[in-house]
Structure formats: C-alpha cells, structure tokens
Amino acid sequence: MAGFADRATAIQPTGVRKMFDMAGDDIISFGLGEPDFQPPEVAIEAMAKAMRAGHNKYTTTAGLPALRQKIAESWAPYQPGLSADNVCMTMSGTNALLNCFMTLVNPGKNVLLPEPYFPLYGPDVTLCGGEPRFYPCLFENEFIPQIETLEAMVDDDTVAILYNFPSNPTGATLDTQQRDELLAFARRHDLWIVSDEVYDRIVYDCDHVSFLGTGYENLILINSFSKTFAMTGWRIGYLLSTNLAVMQELIKVQYYITACSNDAMQYAVLEAFVGADDYPEQMAVEFKARRDLICSRLNAMPGVSCHVPRGAFYVFPKVEVPGLNSEEVALELLKGGVLCSPGTAFGGSGEGHLRFAYTISREDISAGMDKVAATLSGLRK
Ligand SMILES: Cc1ncc(COP(=O)(O)O)c(C=O)c1O
C-alpha cells in the first residue's frame, strides 16, 4: 500500500514557525534566528565573478581545497596544524547535523541532546532510527547541563552527546572548566561529541570556548556560514574533525546526501574569509548593544527575569503570567503586536519562558519592548 515510512510520520513540524505563520504584517518580529545583515559585499561580488568564470559545476564531495584549508587555518588558535583533510563542506549546518547522525547512530542507539534545543536535533536522531534523550539545561543553572543529570541518563546504548554553545535558544556559553567537565563526561562513557558551534564568532565579553583543541579524538564540529557571514539563505556549512577515519565516513555519507556543496558559493565564502574576516565581530558589536538593551528592558518588567547571555542573538527570559502557559503568553503578545517564540517550541522544559531573537534594529527592539510591557501589564490586571 502507498503509505509513509515510520521515520517520517514519527516527526512533527517545528513549533518555531507556528507563531510566524500566524503573524500579520504590522508586527515587530523577534521570531526568526537570522541576522538582519546582508552577506559581506566582497562575497556577493565573488559569487557573481565565480559564476561568470564558469564555477557552476559539481565540486569534489568534500569541497574546494582552498576553502577547506582556509577554514582549517581559521581554527588554528584552538587547534594548530589542521588541513583541508579535516574539513568537509556541506549545504548548511542543518545538512551537517543530519549527516553526523546518519554516520554515528544505529537503530536502537540513543543520543543525548540539550533541552531547550535547536528544534532539528531530536527529529534528526529519530530520522536515523535512534532515540533522542534530552538533558535539561535549566534557568537556575544558567542553562548549563549538570553532570549528575547526564550520568543518570547515559547507558550502554548511548553513542553520542550533542553540545551547543553558544546556545540557541538560551545564548548560554561555556567557560573552560565547564567545558572540561562536559568533556570528561564524554570521555568516561566513550561517547562521540557532536559540538554545534555555529555561533562561535557571535560572543560578547568572553572568548569562545570550543571542544576543538582539547585532544578529544571522537569529536565532530558542526559549523555554518549562516550566522558568521549572515548567509542563512545561501545554505553553506561544514563538518570538521581531527579524526580522519570519521572524516572519511562523513564525506562518503555527504556524497549520498547532496553529492557536494555549491560550487560558486565556495569561492564566495573563501573571498569573505580573505576580504571580510572581521565581519562577524563587527556584527557582534551591534548585537551586543541590542542584547544590553533587550535584557535591561525585560529585567525591568514585573514577573520577567532574564540572564544576560554571552553568545548568539537570543534571550530566553522566564516570563510568569498567572494562569497562562508560555504559548498563551506568546499569543497574547502577538495580539499586542509582537512576535516571539514560546519556550515550549524548544522542548517541554521551555515552559515558562519565551525566546526573543534580537535580530532587529535597536529602535524596533525599544518599540517592541514597549508593547511587551504594555501587554504583560494588561494581563496582570
Ligand atoms: C544551534 C544551531 N545549529 C545549527 C543551525 C543551522 O544553521 P544553518 O542550517 O542555517 O547552517 C542553527 C540555525 O538556526 C542553529 O541555531
């Protein structure tokens, strides 16, 4: 009979888009996690030039050696000596994640994933026949996972743990001690670490702390140019590992997913590295001003409490409105002219929270926060 595979029917559409689809035109949107900047001009020009020069063909599966070499060198402050062999280009971080789980997870095995989470993680593991197991990253712990909790969840069928710092949706980052504890946990249980570091260059008041450079061989780093060079619509990312055996598997699997990444775009990203290398840091200056603004506005509202995150471009405040759950609060805010995501779009433990992406101008943030304050005070009356 013409039916559907269990792996497809087992997954649900993401809740993040739900509010977005309901929103009218005249709302202030803190909804989607993409920079409001355009890619660097040098990259746009390089893309056009590369296309005219005939770079409109398949590339090798792993991608353009010069770009892979450049990416490898960009990680030298963390891990010197990497080369093109340690990098496989993909068509986004999203693609890199799915490839990773396809490469690592057998049916019946489980993967430890953070909650609140970037909504793709769980369905990706399910699509690969694995069991997603969510470890809580709670507000009271500054959204950092607790080792005792991880110890209670891991078993003989756990093959990998995914870490995501800076985090979407919480903005949490790690210090080196926390990183080392999470690393030691993975080492104790001989797990793969899949480290999603797509926000590595959007950090404030601190240096990015990576799992790369720790000497742990069972590590796959996920990255993307969506956030780094504001190229969400271009769909380009990569997988990186010091472990050449896993690189070989990842490259093999990547072939069967997309054959290779986009030819001309790889030249464009290479040019961005050369001609606009400080682009993410420039964006981060503006994001930091917005972060300070939105956190101070939220923390001044009764019943709202917000950690000041040190990475990414999200805040995940606790918003308490008696009698309403987080989806209902988000709906009331939408009626009041502001789009944000209910915390539960990122897993059940997001209840009581909202996610605001500060990817809009400071003027719009101020105007949006006026509306949030007015709606919340109306709901409390
Ligand atoms: C934590 C995290 N990982 C991965 C991605 C995927 O990024 P892309 O598929 O655009 O490269 C995102 C996008 O929002 C993200 O927030």
Image: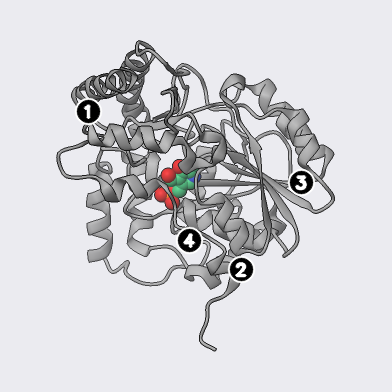
In three-dimensional space, the C-alpha distance between marks 4 and 3, rounded to whole angstroms, equals 28 Å
Q: Is residue 65 above or below residue 305?
A: below
Which comes sooner in the sequence, label 1 or label 2? Answer: 2
The quarter of the picture where residue 379 lies is top left
Q: Nearer the viewer, mark 2 or mark 4?
A: 2
Residue type indicated by callout 2: Lys
Which numbered dot is residue 361? 1
- The answer to whether 312 appears left or right of 361 in the picture is right
Q: Earlier in the sequence, mark 4 or mark 3?
A: 4
Q: Nearer the viewer, mark 1 or mark 4?
A: 1
Residue under label 2: 252
The residue at which mark 3 appears reads as 191
Secondary structure type for disc 1: loop
Residue type at the position of mark 4: Gly
Q: Which residue is mark 4?
A: 63
Residue 192: percent from left, percent from top: 72, 48
Q: Which residue is more in the foreground, 237 or 353?
A: 353
